[in-house]
Image (cartoon, helix red, strand yellow):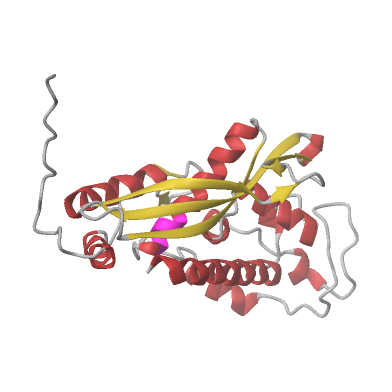
Amino acid sequence: MATTKKEPAVSTKYDKLTLAQKFNLIREDCSGIVKSQTNVESSYTYANINDVFKLIRPSMVKYGVDWEIVLEEASHKTPEGDPIFWKLLQGRSGKAVWLYEADLTLRWINTANPDEDFRQITLHAIGTNDGGPDKAKGSAWTYCLKYYLFEKFNIDQGEADPDMGQNRAEDALRPHSTSQSENPGRSGQRQPQGSGTRQEARKRLTGPQMDRLYRKAEACGMSREAADQRIRQKYGREDPADLSREEYDAICSSLDEAARKAQQGGDQDAQ
């Protein structure tokens, strides 16, 4: 009986390198990213998950590195122990919004020695979408993987804070809040006494400022919809652009801390 001859694996000069050494080579190759997406409301561009894949794929193939999601585990369970991946929430104007939340186990492998040289890490993915549970899952996976890969390979996104100059100017003119408990709404709600004309004339957050906030949310696995929901719950702002600068700075700091803790947990296994 004839047998099919197995083709030998193609060897390269990188076969003797460890997975950790190959990670460093990929970092060297992927110092910056080309942003293909443009915000129609503002004059700035951003990168999506396909831009990240396009950047790192050639180096992964060249050095012999691969990855895959090997486990998807629901973050919540029913009292009987069944997994709950999706929840149906009430969004703006009573519109239904799907929320997906899960832990994803990602495995990196050295293709020259896949059985012995590999790494596994766990990422937390959360996302919302009003288009259905499948879209909520897609949103969660996309944001989670995109910002994990940004941090993993130290990819420079360009101007990390496009509104930094404007922030400094606004800080100099910003009125000081005398109460941490005030929570004014968008319109028709009572403003705190003593706020004065400067409080009433507070500018709305700009497009670049909101993009900065959303990037921070995405860095810890939170979609834009989930960030908006958090802002409504915590600050009572139906429109996130109505956040005060104190509120804006506070939520950005909170998101930075969440992303830092998530990255520290992942790096312990990924390095």
From the top left corner, tell me how far across and down residue 44 is, in percent. Answer: 42, 51
Q: Is residue 71 magenta?
A: no
Q: Residue at 46% x, 46% y: name it.
A: 70
Q: Is residue 149 magenta?
A: yes
Residue 241 placement: quadrant: bottom right
Q: Residue at 50% x, 72% y: name it.
A: 264
Towards the viewer: 224 or 184: 224
Towards the viewer: 184 or 144: 144
Seen in the picture, residue 52 relative to 165 is either above or below; the reply is: above
Residue 249 placement: quadrant: bottom right
- 67 horizontally vs 203: left or right: left
From the top left corner, tell me how far across and down residue 259 is, in percent. Answer: 55, 66
From the top left corner, tell me how far across and down residue 236 is, in percent. Answer: 80, 57
Towards the viewer: 231 or 71: 71
Which residues lie in the magenta part? Answer: 147-151
Q: Considering the image in quadrants, where does the N terminus appear? A: top left
Q: Considering the image in quadrants, where does the C terminus appear? A: bottom left
- 213 horizontally vs 13: left or right: right
Seen in the picture, residue 20 relative to 103 is either above or below; the reply is: below
- Name the chief secondary structure element in magenta: helix
From the top left corner, tell me how far across and down residue 63 is, in percent. Answer: 19, 55
Q: Residue furthest front?
A: 1
- 220 horizontally vs 128: left or right: left
Q: Residue at 77% x, 77% y: name it.
A: 177
Q: Residue at 75% x, 46% y: name it.
A: 81
Residue 237 placement: quadrant: bottom right
